[in-house]
Image (spheres, rainbow, N blue to C red):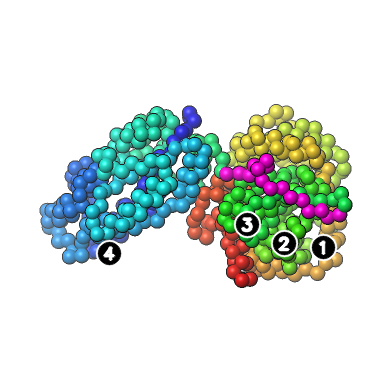
Amino acid sequence: FPMKKAVLFSLWGVVVTPHVAQTFQKFEETTGISRGFIKNVIAKLGSENALYLLEKGKMIPEFEAECQKIAADQGLSLPAQFSAQKLFSDIGQVEFNKPFLDAAAVLRRHGISTCVLANIWVDDTDQRDGVARILSVLESHFNLVVRSCYAGVRIPEPDIFTSALEKLALKPQEAVWLDVDEESIKAAEGLGMTAVQVKDITEALKEINKLTEIEPPSCDPENVSHGYVNIKPGVRIHYVDLGDGPPVLLCHGFPESWFSWRYQIPALANAGFRVLALDMKGYGDSTFCLSAPQGIPQVILVGHDWGGALVWNMAQFHPERVRAVASLNTPLFPVDPKTNPKEKLKAIPIFDYQIYFQNPGVAEAELEKNLERTFKLMFIASNETKSFPSTAGVCQRGGLFVGSPEDPPRSAILSESALQYYIQQFTKSGFRGPLNWYRNGEKNWHWMCSRPRGKIMMPALMVTAGKDPVLLPAFAKGMENLVPNLTRGHIEKCGHWTQMERANFLHFRSVLPSNLPILSQIACIALMTKYIQS
C-alpha cells in the first residue's frame, strides 16, 4: 500500500456506540412496536425513504409521517408513545469510543489527517442537545467532519467519500476508511481506498498503525530527565524520570534497557504518575543493584522478564517499600529450599540457554560479536515468520544463535533508531553484567532461603503472554496461593517482548475490566493503594 495520509472514521458504531440499528431495536422494545418495524420502513421505499432523506437534509416530522403511513398500510396501529422526536433523541444519547479518539489524537500529532463521515440529520427538536454534544466532540478531535445532511449524500454513497477526499486534497489510495458495515467497506474499496471493517477495536487499531506506519508516543533519550543514585563511591544506578504523582518504578529484563519501557513511560506519566525507569544492575549506565531514587519511601513496582522476578522478590522480602506490584510475563516462582535452582533449570528443556550462560566469557563472546545481529535475532514479534532462536538444546549445538541467519531482517517492533540505541548501550556496557543475573541464581537462592517469607498481600497484577516461548502462561498457575490479592491479565497474541509488541494495545484500548489494558490495570492498582492509604 502507498503511505496513508488520512484516516476516515464512520460515526455510528466506530466513533460512537451504540450503532443506530441497535438504538432502533431498543426503541421498538420499549415502545411496544413490532420488532424490525423501523428497518422495514427504511427498506420499504429504498433510497427514497424518509430516514435517508432526513440524513440528506429533510426534517424529522417527515420521518414520523412516513412511519404512520406505512403502519396504516400494514394494518398496524402505532402506540400512543411513539414519537420520532423521542427516537432521534435516543439516537443522540451515545458514548464515545475513547480508543478511537485517542488514536485520532496520535494520528494528528504525526501529521496524518483525520475525518469523520456522519449520516446525521438537522435536529430542530427540543432534545437537540444530544446531536450538539456529538458535533462538539467531533469538531474538537478530528480535522474534518462531513455531515450527510449538509453534503446531500450519505454513507455508503461514493460521493460522500469523494467529497471528503476533495476537502482533504487526497487521492483515494492515500486514505483509510473504518466502519462496521460491510456495504460501506465495499463502497470505499470500490473507489480505491483501503478499508478496515471494525470487528475488534484492538485489531482495528493495529491495522491503522500498520497502514500509517506510526508508533505510539515514546520516550526520546535526548529529551527526558536522567538521574543517578549513588550506592557507594564508584557504584551507582541510572534511571530516567518523567511525570508527577505516585511513583512507579519500571524494571526491565534481559537483554534490555530502561529504553524498553519507552512507550509506557509517557503513557503512565500522562495518567498522573511519576515514572522512574531503571537501567538494571550491569546495564547501560548502572553498575550496581536496585534502589529506589532517594527520598521515595514506597513505589509501585512493575517488572518484565528478570525485572519481573525482581519485583516479586521485592514485594515478598521488602513489602514495606512496595505499594503495589505488577509483572509482565514473569510469574512468581516460589522458593524451594529442598531443590537447587540449577537442578530445576536442567529439568526444563526451554531453560537450557540459562545453563549455557553459566560459563563466564562464552556467551559474552557470542552475543557481543555482532550486536546488530544479536538484537535483530532476539527482538521479534510473535506473528512474524522468522522465529526466536530456540532456547532448548543450546549447550548441545554450541551457542544460542548457532544455525540462525547471519544477516537477519529487522523486526517490525524494532525501529532502526531503537536498534541503534540498544547497540550504543551494549557497546558501552557489554553483556557481562546482564549475563551475571543468570550466574547469581544459586547465591540468590541461598539468600532467599535464609529470609523469612510470607504471602504477598498487597494489590498485585500478573500479565501472561500466550506466545511467549520461554515464560509460558502455565508457569503462573496457582499464584493466588501466595498472592491472594492477585489480578490477572492475558494477551494471547503476544510474545516475550510485551512492551514493544503490544505498545498500541497498551495505549489505545479502554474497555471493561475483563479485557482491561495492562497500563490501566497497573494504574488501577496504583489508584487503589492511593485511596487505601489516604
| Residue positioned 78% across, 53% down in the render | 229
What span is in magenta?
Answer: 217-232
The span from disc 1 to disc 2 (Cα, nearest Å) is 25 Å
In which quadrant of the rendered view does residue 172 lie? Answer: top left
Q: What residue is shown with label 1?
A: 448
Q: What residue is shown with label 3?
A: 244
Crowding at mark 4 (Cα within 10 Å: few <14, some 14-19, many 20+): few
| Residue positioned 21% across, 52% down in the render | 60
Q: Secondary structure at mark 1?
A: helix
In screen coordinates, is 514 left or right of 336? left
Q: Residue type at mark 4?
A: Thr
* Residue 230 falls inside the magenta stretch: yes
Mark 1 vs mark 3, foreground winner is 3
Q: What residue is shown with label 2?
A: 296
Q: Position of residue 474 (x, y in %)?
A: 66, 55
| Residue positioned 20% across, 65% down in the render | 81
